[in-house]
Amino acid sequence: MKRAHNFCAGPAALPTAVLERAQAEMLDWHGKGLSVMEMSHRSDEYVAIAEKAEQDLRELMNVPNHYKVLFMQGGASQQFAQIPLNLLPEGATADYVETGIWSKKAIEEGRRFGNVNVAASGKSLDYFAIPGQNDWQLTPDAAYLHYCSNETIGGVQFDWVPEVGDVPVVVDMSSDILSRPVDVSQFGMIYAGAQKNIGPSGLVVAIIREDLIGRARAICPTMLDYKTAADNGSMYNTPATYSWYLAGLVFEWVKEQGGVEAMARRNHAKQELLYSTIDASEFYSNPVSKNARSWMNVPFRLADERLDKAFLAGADARGLLNLKGHRSVGGMRASIYNATGLDAVEALVAYMAEFEKEHA
Ligand code: PMP
């Protein structure tokens, strides 16, 4: 069996060990004679699987007791609506920071539900940098502040957490959760679509401070009220059982690797190798300002875009997959999440050097 180096932005590479374990357990989970996919979500076995996944995530992120961990569906995009429905009372204002395509989508959706103040925007910086907090126009009594810690498409990442006093900070951590340590107590809510550092797509994990639960508007559908999920152990309806199980296997794997600190060390080494290769060359470039460069998604351009096709074909032939940049920006993008090892980045930079020698 051959596993390629997969640089896909999402659904992204999963650890081979996790897939092997899922494969081994596929037909007969722990001698029970059935697959996790075929289990009742109310069975003792499945409830134990679900609870262990939550417990492991709590341990990995050191989640304080007064936060709920919810496993929901609809991906991160559904949260763009669910957040204002739950946290933005009618007439109130929510602050949003615009740093790229994903935070912009959250802003557009938020506007459907109430007053949205764009407190800061990276637009005038072509989204290649993050405006410093001193320049933000914050609402003193905002219902919450929303930002995206890592813009998956632009490759722009916060290396700091906004400080806005008592205003709850809500963060879209879809593409950098578990990639390095964070202090959960700095946030009102953290959410992440699963398909990068957690597991299969469709699942979204949210970590919410308890006092923010139970504030949904009257019109909020039952299924979208965080209280419904919180009161029912994320099992008001049938949850995405298999995705949740797989997320649990990934959490176990992260723990075995040494937790988020170990992930951070690996991720630091990976991004350093890739950016230093890009910076040392005249042939490749990355426009993002150094303190906002993403450790997870590294967009880069070739000096001559007419070579893009040849670059991608050569990469494919070497088992370096999914390097094409997002359709909205073009160029290349290497997504190097937790499951992508340093060996994958080494193979990529070796290919980049070879291609440059041939074509520069
Ligand atoms: N936010 C970010 C930062 C993302 O990268 C993505 C997906 N790539 C989303 C939100 C949307 O996630 P989903 O497709 O799960 O709705």
Image (cartoon, rainbow, N blue to C red):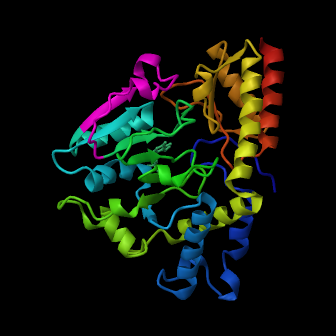
Relative vertical location of residue 176 with respect to residue 120 in this rendering, above or below: below
Total number of numbered labels?
A: 0
Relative vertical location of residue 78 with respect to residue 333 in this rendering, above or below: below
| Residue drawn at 41 percent across, 60 percent down | 209
The quarter of the picture where the N terminus appears is bottom right
Residue 299: x and y, percent? 61, 28
Figure quadrant of residue 25: bottom right
Q: Is residue 299 left or right of residue 135?
A: right
Nearest the viewer among 117 and 151 is: 117
Q: Is residue 202 left or right of residue 312?
A: left
The single residue placed furthest to the front in the displayed view is: 165
Residue 106: x and y, percent? 36, 41
- Res. 339 visible in picture: no
Nearest the viewer among 210 and 35 is: 210
Q: Which residues are magenta?
A: 116-143
Relative vertical location of residue 277 with respect to residue 10 in this rendering, above or below: above
Residue 244: x and y, percent? 54, 67
Relative vertical location of residue 297 with respect to residue 189 in this rendering, above or below: above
| Residue drawn at 23 percent across, 43 percent down | 112
Nearest the viewer among 213 and 74 is: 213
Residue 138 shown in magenta: yes
| Residue drawn at 73 percent across, 73 percent down | 24
Nearest the viewer among 243 and 295 is: 295
Figure quadrant of residue 272: top right
Q: Is residue 57 left or right of residue 237?
A: right
